[in-house]
């Protein structure tokens, strides 16, 4: 399975939960902590992210950065060049 | 299992595949309510501008409404217009500077209520601008009053028993209306309720900016959006409301596409 990761800017997250319902892996959830504005922000709770970018696309605050495993073919292409 | 994978291959190489637009979008938090569709459209517009490399040649016109502070977020040249007159102001800018990419960004209270005349005449003249129309069926900024696009039976603060069609008429389908005008070149209705819809909206916005170079007419993009605060719902409930109630009345899809 392709590995991915997300980083969520907890300072600007407003906890609208749209990324939680958009995540096909159910890897996101609301934190039990609050940010400076008083919102419960979103965290990655399971290490099953595939880097599909669904959460980042629906995020109204543009708070999510998505990382994905480099494709094997791409890696080989780079190494042969 | 996934942890095991990590232990077996500790040096999995990750590359960045998605991040907030850094050049075209200012690094400030949006003032919109949690879950609002406005900020998604702001971000997409600026992503498209950044990807096409037209940040220096783009001029936006901000409306009156929730998105009145659009110029606080978009790092392109912006102009504030009087209520409803964003398309008229954009017309003026485009005529003086015909080589620039001009877009107007308006909500339903601005474009479909007070600015109906300006909207219809701008499209009828076939001005080479992009008009972005955010339709959430309510006046969000002033406290959730009934808009021309409010659905029949929808409860708002000025229609507490639901919109009465016999008294105030049916919701105004602005997009179908302007699609009939000869000046319209590309007319489409998109949405922001799920990741796929966001991808399609981005494609539509990219196309609209590219069509502007052809100087064939007005591009009109309606975005069916949500207003969790105005609808008195949670953001997740508002997404369900869009799917169940908005889409039967405002079907998503291209309404007028250029003939190849």
Image (cartoon, rainbow, N blue to C red):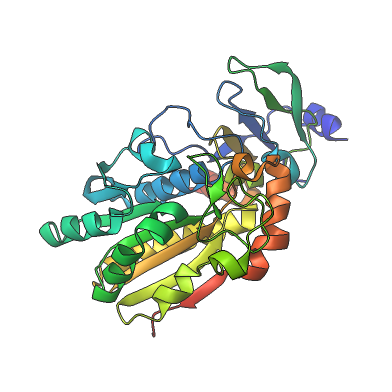
Q: Residue at x 31, y 55 (%)?
A: B103
In the picture shown, does residue A31 fall above or below B77? above
Q: Residue at x 66, y 52 (%)?
A: B155
Residue A2 seen in render: no
A4 vs A37: above or below: below
Which quadrant of the structure image shows residue B168?
bottom right
Q: Is residue A73 left or right of residue B100?
A: right
Taking the view exactly as shown, the residue that stands out farthest to the right is B1
Q: Position of residue B186 (x, y in %)?
A: 39, 73
Choose between B179 and B108: the one closer to the eye. Answer: B108
- Image height check: is B128 above or below B57? below
Q: Nearer the viewer, residue B142 or B220?
A: B142
Q: Is residue B135 above or below residue A21?
A: below
* Relative image position of residue A4 (x, y in whole percent): 68, 38
Quadrant of image for the N terminus of chain B: top right
| Side of A39 where B198 appears, left or right | left
């Amino acid at each position: 399975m392709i590995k991915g990761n997300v980083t969520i800017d907890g300072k600007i997250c407003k906890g609208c939960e749209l990324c939680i319902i958009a995540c096909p892996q159910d890897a996101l959830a609301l934190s039990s902590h609050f940010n400076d504005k008083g919102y419960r922000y979103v965290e990655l709770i399971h290490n099953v992210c595939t880097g599909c970018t669904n959460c980042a696309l629906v995020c109204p605050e543009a708070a999510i950065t998505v990382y994905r495993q480099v494709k094997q073919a791409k890696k080989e292409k780079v190494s042969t060049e | 299992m996934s942890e095991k994978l990590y232990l077996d291959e500790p040096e999995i190489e990750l590359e960045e595949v998605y991040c907030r637009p850094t050049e075209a979008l200012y690094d400030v938090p949006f003032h919109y309510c949690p879950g609002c569709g406005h900020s998604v459209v702001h971000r997409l517009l600026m992503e498209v501008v950044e990807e096409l490399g037209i940040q220096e040649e783009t001029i936006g016109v901000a409306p009156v409404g929730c998105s009145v502070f659009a110029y606080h977020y978009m790092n392109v040249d912006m102009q504030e217009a009087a209520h409803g007159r964003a398309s008229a102001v954009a017309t003026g800018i485009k005529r003086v500077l015909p080589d620039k990419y001009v877009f107007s960004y308006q909500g339903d209270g601005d474009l479909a209520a007070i600015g109906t005349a300006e909207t219809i005449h701008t499209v009828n003249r076939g001005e080479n601008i992009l008009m972005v129309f955010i339709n959430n069926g309510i006046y969000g900024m002033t406290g959730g009053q009934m808009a021309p696009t409010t659905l029949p039976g929808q409860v708002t603060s000025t229609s507490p028993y639901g919109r009465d069609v016999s008294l105030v008429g049916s919701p105004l389908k602005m997009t179908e209306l302007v699609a009939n005008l000869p000046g319209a070149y590309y007319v489409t209705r998109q949405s922001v309720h799920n990741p796929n819809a966001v991808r399609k909206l981005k494609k539509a916005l990219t196309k609209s900016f590219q069509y502007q170079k052809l100087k064939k007419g007005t591009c009109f993009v309606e975005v069916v959006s949500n207003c969790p605060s105005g609808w008195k719902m949670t953001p997740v409930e508002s997404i369900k409301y869009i799917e169940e109630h908005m889409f039967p009345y405002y079907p998503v899809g291209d309404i007028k596409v250029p003939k190849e």
